Image (cartoon, grey):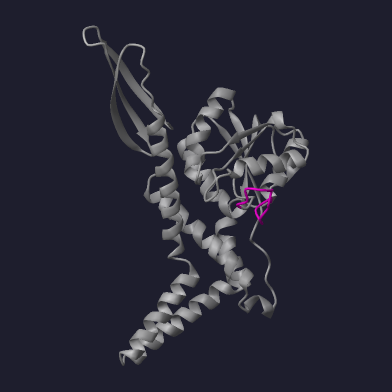
Amino acid sequence: PPHVWLGSIQESPNSMTLQISCIGLFQNEVLSYSLFGHGSKTPCRFGHLANKFDRFNHMSFLLTRFLSALLYPIFTTIVSVALGVVLNWRKKRKLGGVFIVGGVAYLYFFSTTAFSTWLAVGIEKEYGYAELSESPQADAILVLGGGTLQNDIWIELNDSSDRVFNAARLFKAGKAPRVIVTSGGGFSDRPHSQAMSSFLEELGVPRENIIEESQAENTYQHTVYLKPIFEERGITSVILVTSAWHMRRSMAVFESNIDGIEITPFAVDSLNGKYNTLLDYLPTAEGLYKSTKILREYIGFLVYDFRGWID
């Protein structure tokens, strides 16, 4: 099971009963278990506890995604317009009109390139695009998941695949001797880390130089599952590769939860484009997509701060 377990084993010579008591820290909560096994040669297994933790991780992942979706522009607009229609039906036309107009205006602003770019500037200003030549040497290149789509058959890339591509560039430039890919499966049975690893191989990174971590379902859990890998491999410095809009939260989480590791950010996949024409003030699906992605990141940062995952 993840995180730390401390325990004691006591065997009674008369009853031949083996008692194992353990206490563990998981997701900042203290859990304790006491198991009994009869017969000195009968093993007491902890596999069912690990399965419970895996189910808890997955349920937490689904719940977080669902609650975040409630705050996205499309859902908020639908609710606002629906309330406006109901209020109009109940003869409260002024208030109903406010909800309808407000909902449409809200969706309009989030759908423009100008507004999505303005949001991106705010979240990416601390970590701009990194230059390959300026990146220092490190023990490993760490790539956070997000560059592949859910596909159990072949490798399918999305608009964050720059993460994997630039990790290969860093490796070929001799910036680190190994690449760590970290990501769970989310809604798929196949972890993202496997697809990322296969993509890295196609880009020329040898399989023996790739380390997979396939349990983490969110940015905080990356730190949980990477700690033992860092300790086992003697890794004290990493080049952290993720999207520019995701780098602020990633750096905050790693600096707050992992000690003794020098972390160098290498931001890619920026959403901060220039806008200087009237077309950038027209609503588009791309503008809405970018704004929603950045809004989700702002929400994630607030949630992580509330849960104490960020100092």
Residue sitting at x 50%, y 80%: 105
Give the vertical position of 114 relative to 84 (above or below): above
Q: Nearer the viewer, residue 285 or 56?
A: 56
Report the magenta residues as a range: 150-161
Q: Is residue 299 left or right of residue 19?
A: right
How far across and down, in percent of the image, does residue 300 sit?
Answer: 46, 54
Q: Please identify the quarter of the rendering in which residue 54 is found.
A: top left
Give the vertical position of 70 relative to 27 (above or below): below
Q: Nearer the viewer, residue 79 or 189?
A: 189
Q: Nearer the viewer, residue 239 or 187?
A: 187
Q: Is residue 174 left or right of residue 185?
A: right
Give the vertical position of 57 relative to 20 (above or below): below
Q: Single out the residue that lies furthest toward the top.
A: 13
From this viewpoint, is residue 311 visible?
no
Q: Main secondary structure of the magenta part?
A: loop
Residue sitting at x 45%, y 76%: 78
Q: Please identify the quarter of the rendering in which residue 190 is found.
A: top right
The C terminus: image quadrant: top left
The N terminus: image quadrant: top left
Instruction: Look at the image and say whether residue 229 sits in the magenta stretch.
Output: no
Q: Please identify the quarter of the rendering in which residue 251 is found.
A: top right
